[in-house]
Image (cartoon, helix red, strand yellow):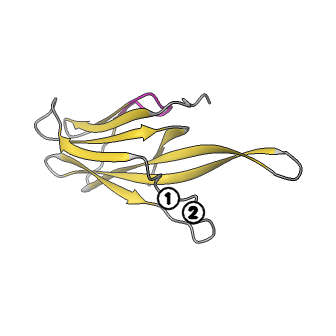
Amino acid sequence: MSLPSHETTITFTGASDDLIYIDGDLPGCDEYNIFKDELYIATFEIVQILETTCTSCKHKETKEYICVKINCFYNGGWYFAVEPVEDENDCDKFKIPDHWIFTTTNCPSSNHSTQLTIEKVENSCIVRREE
Protein backbone atom coordinates (compact mmCIF):
# COMPACT_ATOMS: atom_id res chain seq x y z
CA MET A 1 0.00 0.00 0.00
CA SER A 2 1.39 3.35 -1.01
CA LEU A 3 0.76 6.09 1.53
CA PRO A 4 1.21 9.78 0.82
CA SER A 5 4.06 11.17 2.87
CA HIS A 6 2.79 14.73 2.41
CA GLU A 7 0.08 16.30 4.55
CA THR A 8 -3.38 16.00 3.04
CA THR A 9 -6.99 16.87 3.86
CA ILE A 10 -9.85 14.38 4.06
CA THR A 11 -13.58 15.07 4.30
CA PHE A 12 -16.49 12.93 5.43
CA THR A 13 -19.95 13.78 4.05
CA GLY A 14 -23.24 11.96 3.71
CA ALA A 15 -25.59 11.73 0.74
CA SER A 16 -29.12 10.34 0.70
CA ASP A 17 -29.79 7.99 3.60
CA ASP A 18 -27.28 5.30 2.72
CA LEU A 19 -24.12 6.87 1.26
CA ILE A 20 -20.99 8.22 2.91
CA TYR A 21 -18.33 9.95 0.84
CA ILE A 22 -14.76 10.16 2.07
CA ASP A 23 -12.75 12.48 -0.14
CA GLY A 24 -9.00 12.81 0.05
CA ASP A 25 -5.62 11.54 -1.01
CA LEU A 26 -5.42 8.49 1.31
CA PRO A 27 -6.00 4.80 0.62
CA GLY A 28 -9.56 4.00 1.67
CA CYS A 29 -11.04 7.36 0.61
CA ASP A 30 -14.07 6.29 -1.40
CA GLU A 31 -17.87 6.17 -1.59
CA TYR A 32 -19.46 3.72 0.86
CA ASN A 33 -22.97 2.31 0.52
CA ILE A 34 -24.22 1.77 4.05
CA PHE A 35 -27.55 0.35 5.05
CA LYS A 36 -28.72 -0.45 8.55
CA ASP A 37 -32.01 0.08 10.32
CA GLU A 38 -30.29 1.50 13.37
CA LEU A 39 -29.28 5.06 14.24
CA TYR A 40 -25.61 4.08 14.52
CA ILE A 41 -24.47 3.43 10.98
CA ALA A 42 -20.72 2.93 10.47
CA THR A 43 -17.26 3.27 11.97
CA PHE A 44 -14.11 4.20 10.08
CA GLU A 45 -10.62 4.26 11.54
CA ILE A 46 -7.75 6.47 10.51
CA VAL A 47 -4.74 4.19 10.81
CA GLN A 48 -1.30 5.76 10.87
CA ILE A 49 1.54 3.63 9.53
CA LEU A 50 4.90 4.49 11.08
CA GLU A 51 8.32 3.05 10.41
CA THR A 52 10.61 2.70 13.41
CA THR A 53 14.26 1.71 13.53
CA CYS A 54 15.86 -0.17 16.40
CA THR A 55 18.72 1.95 17.76
CA SER A 56 20.98 -1.03 18.48
CA CYS A 57 20.50 -3.36 15.49
CA LYS A 58 19.12 -0.84 12.94
CA HIS A 59 16.27 -3.23 12.06
CA LYS A 60 13.33 -1.36 10.52
CA GLU A 61 9.83 -2.23 11.60
CA THR A 62 6.49 -0.91 10.36
CA LYS A 63 3.66 -0.56 12.86
CA GLU A 64 0.03 0.45 12.46
CA TYR A 65 -1.54 2.73 15.04
CA ILE A 66 -5.24 3.50 15.12
CA CYS A 67 -5.30 7.25 15.73
CA VAL A 68 -9.00 7.98 15.70
CA LYS A 69 -12.38 6.45 14.98
CA ILE A 70 -14.99 8.33 12.99
CA ASN A 71 -18.49 7.22 13.95
CA CYS A 72 -21.13 8.02 11.33
CA PHE A 73 -24.78 8.45 12.29
CA TYR A 74 -27.93 9.01 10.27
CA ASN A 75 -31.16 10.25 11.84
CA GLY A 76 -32.78 12.18 9.00
CA GLY A 77 -29.39 13.80 8.43
CA TRP A 78 -25.76 12.74 8.61
CA TYR A 79 -23.44 13.67 11.43
CA PHE A 80 -19.98 12.46 12.41
CA ALA A 81 -18.41 11.93 15.83
CA VAL A 82 -14.66 11.80 16.43
CA GLU A 83 -13.61 9.18 18.97
CA PRO A 84 -10.04 9.17 20.30
CA VAL A 85 -8.48 5.74 20.70
CA GLU A 86 -6.21 4.88 23.58
CA ASP A 87 -4.39 1.72 24.49
CA GLU A 88 -3.21 1.25 28.08
CA ASN A 89 0.04 -0.33 26.93
CA ASP A 90 1.10 2.34 24.44
CA CYS A 91 -0.88 5.51 25.20
CA ASP A 92 1.57 7.94 23.62
CA LYS A 93 1.32 6.35 20.20
CA PHE A 94 -2.44 5.77 20.24
CA LYS A 95 -3.57 9.37 20.29
CA ILE A 96 -4.73 11.90 17.79
CA PRO A 97 -1.68 13.72 16.43
CA ASP A 98 -1.61 17.26 17.83
CA HIS A 99 -1.19 18.90 14.43
CA TRP A 100 -4.34 17.35 12.88
CA ILE A 101 -7.11 19.95 12.55
CA PHE A 102 -10.76 18.84 12.83
CA THR A 103 -13.59 21.05 11.56
CA THR A 104 -17.31 20.33 11.36
CA THR A 105 -19.49 22.49 9.10
CA ASN A 106 -22.71 22.26 7.16
CA CYS A 107 -22.07 20.29 3.99
CA PRO A 108 -22.07 22.67 0.99
CA SER A 109 -23.39 19.96 -1.38
CA SER A 110 -26.13 18.48 0.82
CA ASN A 111 -28.76 20.06 3.02
CA HIS A 112 -29.05 16.93 5.20
CA SER A 113 -25.42 16.35 6.15
CA THR A 114 -22.66 17.87 8.18
CA GLN A 115 -19.13 17.76 6.80
CA LEU A 116 -16.17 16.62 8.87
CA THR A 117 -12.82 17.89 7.58
CA ILE A 118 -9.50 16.64 8.93
CA GLU A 119 -6.41 18.57 7.84
CA LYS A 120 -2.70 17.76 7.96
CA VAL A 121 -3.13 13.96 7.89
CA GLU A 122 -0.10 11.98 6.67
CA ASN A 123 1.20 8.39 6.52
CA SER A 124 -2.32 7.09 7.09
CA CYS A 125 -5.15 5.13 5.54
CA ILE A 126 -8.90 4.84 6.09
CA VAL A 127 -10.32 1.49 7.22
CA ARG A 128 -14.02 0.67 7.53
CA ARG A 129 -14.79 -1.52 10.52
CA GLU A 130 -17.79 -3.79 10.15
CA GLU A 131 -19.59 -4.12 13.46
Q: Is residue 19 visible?
A: no
The majority secondary structure of the magenta stretch comes to loop
Q: Which residues are magenta?
A: 24-31
Q: Position of residue 123 (x, y in %)?
A: 55, 38
Residue at position x 49%, y 59% from top? 95
Answer with left or right where residue 26 lies relative to residue 36: right
Q: Is residue 117 visible?
A: yes
Whether 3 is drawn above or below 80: the answer is above
Give the amino acid at mark 1.
Lys
Q: Position of residue 125 (x, y in %)?
A: 51, 38
Q: Check the picture and name the quadrant holding the C terminus.
A: bottom left
Q: For residue 20, what is the image quadrant? A: top left
Does dot 1 land on a helix, a strand or a loop?
Answer: loop
Residue at position x 57%, y 63% from top? 92
Label 2 with label 1: CB-CB less than 8 Å: yes
Marking on residue 95: 1
Provide the residue designation for mark 2. 92
